């Protein structure tokens, strides 16, 4: 296996981004797989405990201000930048597995949650989000009282 310079690697990423942009533009696709990132995948676990939903995302090596969480409708957005602080400019890398660059993950919330009371904690490289479940009332049949004017 040959080595690859940082400059060559960055050119490959630039070509990849342009190809993804063209695919989105001509196909109308806007999926997480075609995001404007360096393919920094954020692995997540989503689970319930009683009336709460927990989302844990593994994102090691971040400092305050390098990550943001947004909620819109029933989607949760995790966005940030994983800095490239340990790479050496002069080195020709033989193998690169530790990702860096822009990170983004969009998670569709699994059920009705109260997004106004969401809490987030970052500890030991794990981002933990906690949402309270709310009882979804769609599909529930209930009688509506009708007021008649006489």
Image (cartoon, grey):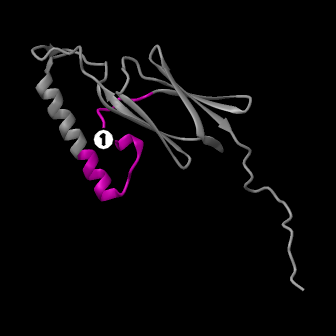
Outermost residue to the bottom:
150
Residue 32 position (above or below residue 141): above
Q: Say left or right for 23 vs 125.
A: left
* 47 magenta-colored: no
Q: Indicate the secondary structure of the residue bearing disc 1.
A: loop
Which residue: 31% across, 23% down?
A: 99
Q: Are there few (<14), some (14-19), or many (20+) residues within 10 Å of tag 1?
A: some
Residue 97 position (above or below residue 20): above
Residue 114 position (above or below residue 49): below
**Number of numbered discs visible in the structure rendering:** 1
The quarter of the picture where the C terminus appears is: bottom right
* 40 magenta-colored: yes
Q: Say left or right for 123 vs 116.
A: left
Outermost residue to the front:
150
Which residue: 24% across, 21% down?
A: 84
The quarter of the picture where the N terminus appears is: top left
Residue 139 locus on image (x, y percent)? 75, 57
**Where on the picture, by quarter, is residue 108?**
top right
Q: Say left or right for 48 vs 35.
A: right
Residue 59 locus on image (x, y percent)? 42, 22
Residue bearing the label numbered 1: 36
Which residue: 68% across, 38% down?
A: 133
Residue 63 locus on image (x, y percent)? 36, 20
Which residue: 37% across, 20% down?
A: 62
Report the magenta residues as a range: 19-42
Outermost residue to the left:
90
């Amino acid at each position: 296996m040959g080595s690859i310079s940082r400059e060559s690697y960055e050119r490959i990423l630039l070509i990849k981004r342009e190809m993804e942009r063209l695919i989105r533009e001509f196909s109308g696709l806007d999926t997480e797989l075609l995001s404007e990132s360096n393919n920094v995948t954020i692995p997540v676990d989503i689970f319930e405990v009683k009336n709460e939903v927990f989302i844990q995302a593994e994102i090691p090596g971040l400092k305050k201000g390098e990550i943001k969480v947004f909620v819109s409708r029933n989607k949760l957005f995790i966005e940030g930048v994983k800095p490239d602080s340990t790479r050496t400019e002069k080195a020709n890398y033989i193998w690169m597995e530790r990702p860096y660059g822009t990170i983004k993950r969009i998670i569709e919330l699994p059920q009705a949650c109260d997004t106004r009371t969401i809490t987030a904690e970052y500890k030991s490289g794990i981002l933990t989000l906690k949402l309270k479940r709310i009882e979804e009332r769609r599909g529930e049949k209930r009688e509506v009282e009708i007021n008649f004017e006489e």
